[in-house]
Each structure stands twice: as C-alpha cells, then as structure tokens.
Image: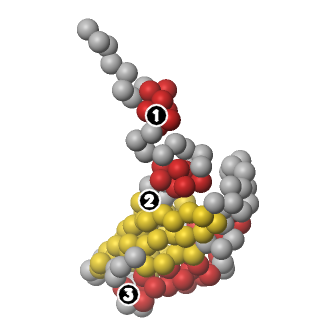
Amino acid sequence: MTDSELAVAWVQAWSGRDPTVFAAICEPDLHYEDPLTPAPLRGPAALGDHARRLWEAFPDVRMEAASDPLADAARVAMPVRLLGTHTEAIEGLPPSGRPVRVHALCYAELAGGRLHRVRTFLDVYDAGTQLGVLPRRGTLGEKALLMLQGFGLRSRS
C-alpha cells in the first residue's frame, strides 16, 4: 500500500464504523496515542475499541483529509478534520447536541507498509468549547479557569 493509499485508508477506517478495519492498515503491535487516551493503546483491537467509543458518542462523526499527506519511506503525516454531532454520553459527559469540528494531525511511523506508531494531535480545549463544557478563549470564564489552575497568579510585590 502506498503512503497516499494508507492515508486514505486511515481516514476511511475512522469514518467507516468497523473497528476490525484497523487490523488491515496497522501493525499487530501498533502503538497509538491521542489527547483522549489516558495511556498508549496497543494493537489494532484497542484502537478499534477507542474508535467505537467515539462513534457511539458522535454517531455521525467522520474524518476527512484536510490536505494531502506528507510522507517519506518511514513516516506519514496526515492533516485531517473530525466532524460530528455529540448526541450520546461519553466518559461521563452528557450529550450536548452540539456539532464539533476539530482539526487534527495524525503522525505515523511505518513498518512493513502499515502504521506502526501513530500519534494524533488535536486541540482538546477547542473541542471542549464547541461542546459548551469549557469557556471560550479570551473570556472572563477562561481567565477564571486559568486562575483556578494556578496560572496568572503572581505576587504584586
């Protein structure tokens, strides 16, 4: 499979709602991370379970390419967008009914023509503001949240 075909298959796997598809494009010892995984996932089945939770909370979610992948013989970077509507609970978060559009970058190391180590980068804070669970950037609510976290507190001496 070429790098471009692999990138297309990755996007289709996330949009296709079949968790077993990841086995065809990922190495059996896949290592996967994104900001929503508390620890790295190991293997295509674990990735499929992770995707299933996303599909349950966002039944209409789809991934689409944001631009052409950047690749060489050992790596591929895939700029993508995730789009969907939050209609079911996930990880204790009740459904908001809100649409979400999040840009992400999936960076993968390749082995044997398949994905071996994949790390997805996305702005979780932006997703949280779109869902209405975090204050918009630049607002008083965001400043209060940052102060509660210990940012912006300085001695005035």
Task: Examine the image and state in which quarter residue 41 appears.
Answer: bottom right
Label 3: element kind:
helix
Q: Earlier in the sequence, mark 3 or mark 2?
A: 3
Q: Position of residue 95 (x, y in %)?
A: 71, 56
118 or 144: nearer the viewer: 144
**Residue at mark 3 to residue at mark 1: CA–CA distance:** 44 Å
Classify 94 as above or below 147.
Answer: below
Q: Residues within 10 Å of mark 3 (few under 14, many from 20)?
A: some
Is any part of residue 49 visible from this angle? Answer: no
Residue at the spot 48% in from the left edge and 63% down from the top edge: 102
**Residue at mark 2 to residue at mark 1: CA–CA distance:** 24 Å
Classify 41 as above or below 64.
Answer: above
Is any part of residue 83 visible from this angle? Answer: yes
Going by the numbered disc 2, the residue's amino acid type is: Leu
Q: Position of residue 137 (x, y in %)?
A: 43, 45
Please report contact status of discs 3 and 1: CB closer than 8 Å, yes or no: no
Give the residue at the far top of this rendering.
Answer: 157
The residue indicated by pointer 1 is: 140
Label 2: element kind:
strand
Q: Earlier in the sequence, mark 2 or mark 1?
A: 2
88 or 6: nearer the viewer: 88
Going by the numbered disc 1, the residue's amino acid type is: Leu
Dividing the image into 4 quarters, which one contains the C terminus?
top left
The residue indicated by pointer 2 is: 122
Please report contact status of discs 3 and 2: CB closer than 8 Å, yes or no: no
**Residue 4: mark in rendering:** 3
**Residue 26: mark in rendering:** none
